[in-house]
Amino acid sequence: GTVRWWDRKTTQFDVAFKNGSRSWISDMVLMESLHEVAVASVDRVISIYDTNSQSLVRQYKGKKETKTNAKEVAYWKNSRQGTKTRAEMIVMDNLNSSPMCLAFFDPLNYVVDSQEKKDKFLFVGTDKGYVQTYDITRSEQNCVKVRKKWKLHNGWVTKIFVSQQLDSGSFITSSLDGKIKITHLEKNSAPRMLSGHKKGIYSFDWSSNLKIIASCGSE
């Protein structure tokens, strides 16, 4: 459960600290437009760190119930400064299984609707094969609600790729079930499935120039 930072200019090691939830970290994603980093852990907690101060600013905790009577507070110790920081704990609606991979999408130039241009979407892939989206810039009654949820795989989702470079507003996912799927963000059409792997897929990448997907698995 350790997070380590390196200086991007000098590539020198900067600081290491225990993640806020102190559980196994499954993935991280840079949310550049928010100047934040999201860190997922298998205990259904997603911790958000400020990239400038490298401090914990808030945590999202998965719960089956969307209502909570009292606000929870997370405490994070800054080993460099020797101080303890309070961070708001926000309920993440309908996150019933462990988050295994993350992706961030800022649809500034993608969505036509002026209101949705303000939304910042965090994609969460779980160990049960679900992909869920949340607008983490909005919370109501100490809860951020799931915007959309897809059951795409029969195994652990290993990677999510979402970009304005993809045609027709789609995102790509891979899984240990040996499948890659291309799913539209808004349409209710069935996902396009790419097969060929006989065992689990651990990662893939997309070339916007060549319009191809390269994937790797455990074969």
Image (cartoon, grey):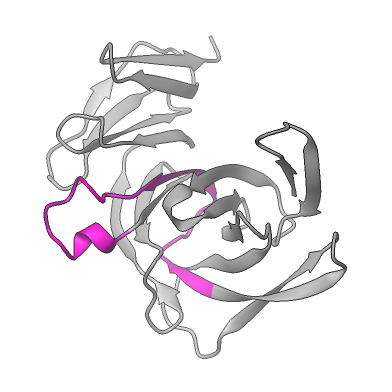
**In percent of the image, x 12 and y 59: which residue is there?**
113
Query: What is the x, y in percent for residue 41?
Result: 62, 51
Above-or-below relation of 163 to 115: above
Residue found 71% across the figure and 53% down from its top: 23
Return the residue nearer the eye: 190 or 148: 148
Query: Does the image show residue 102?
Result: yes
Asked if 201 appears above or below 19 in the picture, the reply is above
Rendering coords of residue 22 (x, y %): 75, 57
Q: How many marks?
A: 0
Relative horizontal placement of residue 17, taking residue 184 as reference (left or right): right
Q: Which residue shows up at 26% across the image and 49% down it?
A: 107
Q: Is residue 90 above or below residue 35?
A: below
The residue shown at (31%, 16%) is 195
Determine which quarter of the picture holds residue 47.
bottom right
Of 193 and 12, the residue lying toward us: 12
Does the magenta run of residues contain 185?
A: no
User: Where does the image place residue 18, in percent across and percent down from the top left?
Assistant: 78, 55
Instruction: Residue at the far bottom: name it.
Output: 69
Residue 171 placement, left or right of 43: left
**Can you see residue 154?**
no
Residue interval drawn in magenta: 90-119
Q: Position of residue 34 (x, y in %)?
A: 46, 57
- The one of 177 and 42 positioned closer to us in this rendering: 42
What is the quadrant of residue 157 in the picture?
top left
Query: Would you say 21 lies left or right of 59 here?
Result: right
